[in-house]
Image (cartoon, rainbow, N blue to C red):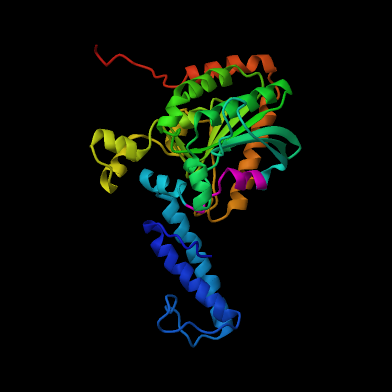
């Protein structure tokens, strides 16, 4: 049950998990915990039957504690959950929700960017183009993927495959998970801003359904470069904003630390709940209690259900009408109403 990576607000839950693991060991006839071991919080003289009974009781307590902690996350804690090293990434979701996934490489101009993965496959009975950011799991893979921060060739690869999906009348599903586009000199030399700008323009014109989900981090133009869609959703513990909290804190307070990161995260209204309230996204996809990293399969099932429901609802529209609907959706963002003050 232990994830071997504990956020500070999860420590009370981690202690319960340690007790459950120790009790399970005794219940299965294993050796009792030694006085010097971490889970020695249980009585070493417990019988297997008593250990099993106590473990069952603690599991209920564990679920209640998890629910309480994750129901009251601060915006900054939400960002930290979105960055959890065990959180499912693009390739994890692709393996769980997509059948017969065939990856496509290269932008036909410069090269292949592993930070953005594209490919055709089936979700349920629906053939789709699935693409998204991939951060990498091992140190080597993370460095190759620039931690999910794509170069211009990544965005050009994504657009080229989206154009192919449009040609074959296949819907497009994008999974967003990046702190932002790669900010290096090489990326600028190869036209980072232009590549993202072209994606924004062309995605708004594509005549095939597009749905987008922020599965972890959604930072700045790096996220928006593959997120101009007919329907946009966020996983419950993801974040979506014009800038990362650290970047915002460094600009406003000239330093990024725990205090300023907290203030920035709150000011940015970056949580899924905030984005739904402001009309930036259409729906929040519920995660398992304790976050997607605790039960990736359940998170993938919820993601797949939303994708299929959204694509089904978009089938009623003619393909030629989708760009106009998409345009109106994004033009309506930021609308507000003013009323004259009483007695004015």
Where does the magenta region start and end?
85-95
Count all numbered tags in the image, as a single digit.
0
Q: State the residue in front, 284 or 205.
A: 205
In the image, is 90 to the left or to the right of 127? left
Q: Residue furthest bottom?
A: 45
Image coordinates for residue 165, horizontal then vertical, percent: 69, 26
Picture layout, residue 295 above or below residue 337: below
Task: Please identify the quarter of the rendering in which residue 120 is found.
Answer: top right
Q: Residue furthest right?
A: 125
Image coordinates for residue 122, horizontal then vertical, percent: 73, 38
Is residue 33 visible to us here? yes
In the image, is 315 to the left or to the right of 152? right
Q: State the residue in front, 86 or 235.
A: 86
Image coordinates for residue 90, horizontal then vertical, percent: 58, 43
Residue 307 is covered by the magenta coloring: no
Image coordinates for residue 71, horizontal then vertical, percent: 44, 50
Name the residue: 43% across, 55% down: 68
Picture layout, residue 270 above or below residue 167: below
In the image, is 255 to the left or to the right of 219? left
């Amino acid at each position: 049950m232990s994830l071997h990576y504990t956020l500070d607000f999860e420590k009370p839950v981690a202690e319960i998990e340690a007790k459950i693991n120790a009790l399970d060991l005794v219940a299965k006839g294993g050796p009792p915990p030694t006085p010097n071991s971490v889970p020695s919080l249980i009585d070493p003289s417990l019988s297997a039957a008593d250990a099993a009974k106590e473990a069952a009781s603690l599991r209920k307590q564990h679920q209640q504690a998890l629910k309480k902690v994750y129901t009251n996350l601060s915006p900054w804690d939400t960002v930290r959950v979105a960055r959890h090293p065990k959180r499912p990434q693009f390739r994890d979701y692709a393996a769980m929700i997509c059948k017969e996934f065939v990856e496509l490489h290269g932008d036909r101009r410069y090269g292949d960017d592993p930070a953005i993965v594209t490919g055709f496959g089936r979700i349920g009975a629906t053939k789709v183009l699935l693409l998204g950011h991939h951060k990498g799991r091992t140190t080597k893979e993370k460095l190759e993927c620039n931690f999910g921060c794509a170069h211009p060739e990544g965005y050009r690869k994504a657009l080229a495959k989206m154009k192919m999906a449009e040609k074959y009348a296949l819907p497009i599903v994008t999974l967003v998970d990046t702190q932002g586009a790669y900010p290096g000199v090489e990326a600028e030399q190869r036209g980072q801003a232009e590549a993202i700008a072209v994606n924004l323009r062309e995605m708004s014109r594509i005549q095939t359904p597009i749905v987008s989900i922020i599965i972890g981090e959604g930072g700045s133009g790096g996220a928006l470069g593959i997120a101009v869609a007919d329907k946009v959703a966020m996983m419950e513990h993801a974040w979506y904003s014009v800038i990362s909290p650290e970047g915002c804190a460094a600009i406003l307070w000239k330093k990024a630390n725990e205090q300023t990161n907290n203030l920035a995260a709150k000011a940015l209204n970056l949580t899924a709940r905030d984005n739904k309230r402001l009309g930036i996204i259409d729906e929040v996809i519920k995660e398992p209690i304790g976050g997607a990293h605790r039960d990736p399969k359940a998170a993938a099932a919820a993601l797949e259900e939303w994708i299929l429901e959204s694509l089904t609802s978009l089938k009623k529209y003619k393909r030629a009408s989708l760009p106009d609907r998409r345009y109106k959706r994004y033009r309506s963002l930021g609308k507000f109403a003013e009323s004259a003050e009483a007695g004015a």
